[in-house]
Amino acid sequence: MNTENNQNLFNKITDSINTLLNLIYPPVCRVCETQLDSYDKICICDACWKTFEQPLEPICPKCGSELERPVQENKPCPNCPTPIYYNAAKAAFRHNGAVRKIIHEYKYNSIKEMSFPLGNFMAKHLHKHFDVYPSTIIAPVPLHWTRKLQRGFNQSYLLSAIIGNLLNIPVEKYSLVRRKITKTQQGLSRRERQHNLLGAFGVINPAAFLNKNIILIDDVMTTTSTVNECAKMLKESGAAQVFAYCLARAVQSDITNA
C-alpha cells in the first residue's frame, strides 16, 4: 500500500471516529459551552473567538503593559521591572473575559488541543512584534519537573513547538530549566513575585544561547517577573537579545493590584 493510500485510509478512519464522537459526546465550545458542529482542533466557537481582545494602545514599548498615556521609546514605564533584562515583551491577547477562561481550561483541565488555535494566532502575529534573524531561536518558560508531572505538559512548550514549526524557527526545549519549586505567583505583590523567583531558573547548556536572539514564550504575563528572571539567566549565558512573547498580558487593574 503506497503513501497516498495510507493517508486516505487514515483520513477515513479519523472521519469515522469524529462522527462517532459527535454522536456520543457532542462537542461544545470551551468558553460558552455552545454545541459545535464537529470535533476539530479549535474547540472555540466563532462568537467567543471574536471576543478575544488584543492589547489596547498606548502600550509600553518595553514591558508591553497598557498605559494611560504613551512613554518615550526605549524608556521604562511605571510597570517595568527594575532592573529590566529582556529587550521587549509583547502579548497576543488581553488576559480577561473569554481569554482568561480558555487559558484556565488549557492549563488546569489538560485541554492540550487548545495549543493549536492559540499557537497559530501567536505565530501569525509574531512578525508584527519582533524581527526574526538567522540567529533567532525560541525558548519556552520551563516548568519544574514536579509541576509538569502533575499537569502532564508544559503549555509554554506546546505553544513554542507550534510557533516554531509554523515559522521554521528552532525551539530550544531543554537548556533553560526551572531549578526549584516556587509558590504560585497569583496573589503576590510585585516585590513578592521577584523574591519568589530568585534562583528559580538556570541554564544547563549556555552554548545553546550564545549570541542568539531569543524569543521567550509564556502563557500569561502580569508583572513580567517570570520572563525577566529567565531573561537574566539567558543574558548571563551569552544571549544577544531576549524578547518575551506571551499568549495573554494582564490588564492594567491586575498589574496595579499585583
Image (cartoon, rainbow, N blue to C red):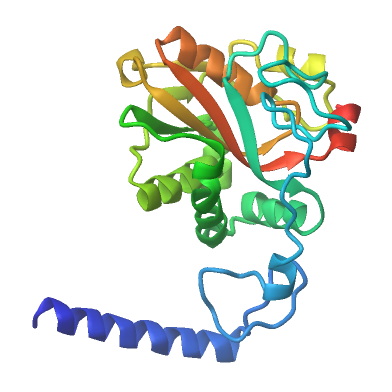
Q: 108 above or below 10?
A: above
- The answer to whether residue 136 shows anywhere in this view is yes
| Left or right: 38 in relation to 185 | left
Task: Please tell me which residue lies in front, 192 or 245.
Answer: 245
Instruction: Answer with the quarter of the image where residue 185 lies.
Output: top right
Outermost residue, left side: 1
Give x and y (percent) for residue 18.
47, 84
At horizontal 31% and vertical 31% (from top left) the residue drawn is: 134
Instruction: Answer with the quarter of the image where residue 39 lies.
Output: bottom right
At horizontal 33% and vertical 37% (from top left) the residue drawn is: 170
Q: 12 above or below 79?
A: below
Question: How many numbered markers are drawn?
Answer: 0
**Viewport quadrant of the N terminus:** bottom left
Give x and y (percent) for residue 82.
72, 10
Q: 46 above or below 188?
A: below
| Left or right: 249 in relation to 123 | right
Q: 204 above or below 26?
A: above
Instruction: Answer with the quarter of the image where residue 213 lies.
Output: top left
At horizontal 71% and vertical 51% (from top left) the residue drawn is: 104
Give x and y (percent) for residue 145.
50, 32
| Left or right: 46 in relation to 161 | right
Give x and y (percent) for residue 5.
16, 84
**Viewport quadrant of the C terminus:** top right
Outermost residue, front side: 72
- The answer to whether residue 182 shows anywhere in this view is no
